[in-house]
Amino acid sequence: SSPGGSPAPHRPPVCVYLSFPALLWRWQAGHKPQYPPWSSGNITLSRLDPCHFGIFCYVVRPCHCGEVEMNKEIMSRVVRKRQADPKVVQYVWAAIEVIRNQKQIANMDRISKYLSRVFGMHPKETARQLSLAVKDGLVVETLTVGCKGSKAGIEQEGYWLPGDEMEPKAEGSKDWETESHDWYCMECHLPGDVLPCDNCFRVYHLKCLSEECKPRDGGSHWQCVVCRGSKKKNLNKQEMCKYLRFIIQRMKERAVDLNKKGKDTKHPMYRRLIHTAVEVTNIQENLSEGKYKSFDEFKADVQLIVHNTSILFGVHSDQAEIARLLFSDTCHELNELLLCKNCFYLSNARPDNWFCYPCSPSHDLVWAKMKGFGYWPAKVLQREDNQVDVRFFGHQHQRAWIPADNIQDIKVSIQQLQVKRSSGWKKACEELEVYQRFLREGRFWKTKMEESPQLHQQNHRQHQEEPRLERTEEAESSISSTSNEQVRHMKISLEPKAKKSRRTQIVEPKEEASDPEPEMEAVSSSQEIPVSSALQQPEKLSVSTQTKKASGGSPRMLHRSTQTNSDGACQNMCHEKYTKVFNDVKEMMKADNKRETERVVREALEKLRAEMEEEKRQAVSKAVSGVQVEMERKCKQVKEKCKEELVEEVKKLVAQHKQLISQTKKKQWCYNCEEEAMYHCCWNTSYCSIKCQQEHWHADHKRTCRRKR
């Protein structure tokens, strides 16, 4: 705007050429702008010649003063951490190591020649990147005196690896150890002017951020995309571990090539480029320790693998491509997990009838028709515009995006669909019927972690019932305190077995509990026997009946005989009866417990055997697939090696053939017998011997010889 505050008139964009070495500006228009040309959102940068010593062209669009002030505040947050390309820095390190191993000074000339010969770098680009690496503290520049050769005793510039220099007090040599933020952008993995996050170590170029992620002003607290996504908590730690362990296992299988081609992370220079080192094993450890609170944190660590790989090997390297594929596959798996957790878990765990268990909420059932096939039963996973993502019932449970026009409700009769009832279609319909039956019965798949709260509630109820049982036992013990020693011994021997069989113990009525007569206790014990043992034996029932009749027919006589102990024969008879009854019950309970133990052991063995067979089958299939993949890879390597050897052999043969032809052309040959000649006659005639010369002379050559005589 103008100094008076009125809005400035519309002006066309101004083209600026900026040369970094000379800091020269050239304007197509005849005025200077009132704002910095690097304001965010007002500059379009187009590179004219990247190898022409850093000359750029900027197109600056006019803006208002408020926007300029805001851009100034945002630019005040931007810092320049490093400028050298990390891939070129590694080239320079390799050149310095090679030159130093040859006991030579690593000067500019030797480094430039090495990079030009090995990596094809231009000397000017080498000089520029080397100077930037020195500013970043990744290469140390010193003055070294030559001790041999033509430059002996002459000071010359030498370059060292950080930590190997003669004077380790170089500028920026230890800054990398205390650095709180990364040095390279998390999006493009390149150095430059970056915006650091206030919550984590990540940094970004302003041009790499979307408009909604850029800071609004210079004083507010700014968070990166990862920190914003990590605030929302998806699941608890146990559920996160339950679902993400499948993704980790798949990542470990896909990261084999990345680990084989990766560099040694223990190299002393590794930590100067990689701020936060992360591998698949580290992610697995973090998951087992419950450090992830959301899926975005898990995805951020996988993205960090891509970042570190791109820094070490280059953005366009094969290793970076493998890391990007790993990240895209992980994002796909996370999207599938967010789409339906139950489907994700069952499709990876694969229990019996895993596709028949309904989800919560359950998926819609439809008839779906692919191009070239008939209608097939399927589940609807998601809908987008006019497309439906379905998963078919059947053997392979394939997924596909089907147009909405080819979808029919599951209630539509089969006669209207006019399908061909093949064996696969019938199996799919059978699986559909099982799914519908499970849905009607409410049979949902529950893992051990989901069942644990219910088990905890059951255990809590059992603990509440234990005091009641203890009070019942106390009442029984008070009733039996007046009985004789033999009956008490038989009752105590039965109580542990009744507890083991988890039967409900019988409590005497209040009138009987208040009566201290021992015969009443004996009758109550005989009544407890059939209930606690749950055995229906005629002999035991007859004894119990006789006891009841005896107690009911003459209670006074039994009471009198018990108090005086005068009738020894009756007491011996009762003792024999109860001893026999309890011995029989004891034997029957032993047999019952033995059969129950054998049944439990047999079921456990069958279950373990089935699990072992399943694990064995999975291990064999996995090993076979791994061996097949390894064999294919080995065969491919052998074929490529054979092709390379064949090409090399053909090149050698062609070179030998050319050499032999050249040698043959350089020799002279006998005109008569075509052997190697040693006697020259004229311009195109030579002979190997005098004999051939005479024969050819008399035959023909004396008429055509051009030799002067």
Image (spheres, rainbow, N blue to C red):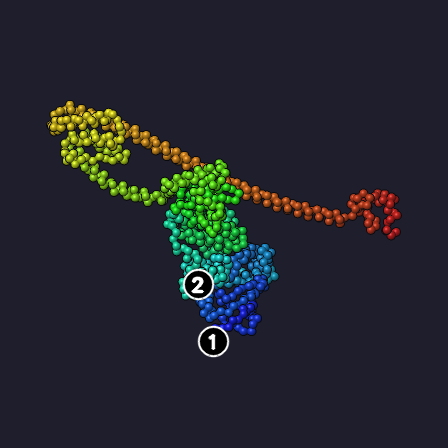
How far from the left and from the top, in percent, is residue 505?
23, 35
**Label annotation for residue 633:** none
Residue 213 at x, y percent in the picture:
45, 60
- Indicate which label's residue lies in the foreground, 2 or 1: 1
Relative to 176, say whether 667 is above or below. above
The kind of residue on which mark 1 rests is Pro
Image point 81% across, 45% down: which residue? 671
Please name whichever residue, 508 or 83, is drawn nearer the observer in this view of the structure.
Answer: 508
Residue 408: x and y in percent read: 46, 45
Residue 378 seen by the camera: no
Name the residue: 54% across, 70% down: 12
**How far, Cα to Cα, is label 2 from label 1?**
28 Å
Where's residue 19, x and y in %?
A: 56, 67
- What amino acid is at disc 2? Pro
Q: Earlier in the sequence, mark 2 or mark 1?
A: 1
Name the residue carrying label 2. Answer: 215
Looking at the picture, tell me which residue is in the foreground, 38 or 454.
454
Q: Which mark is residue 3?
A: 1
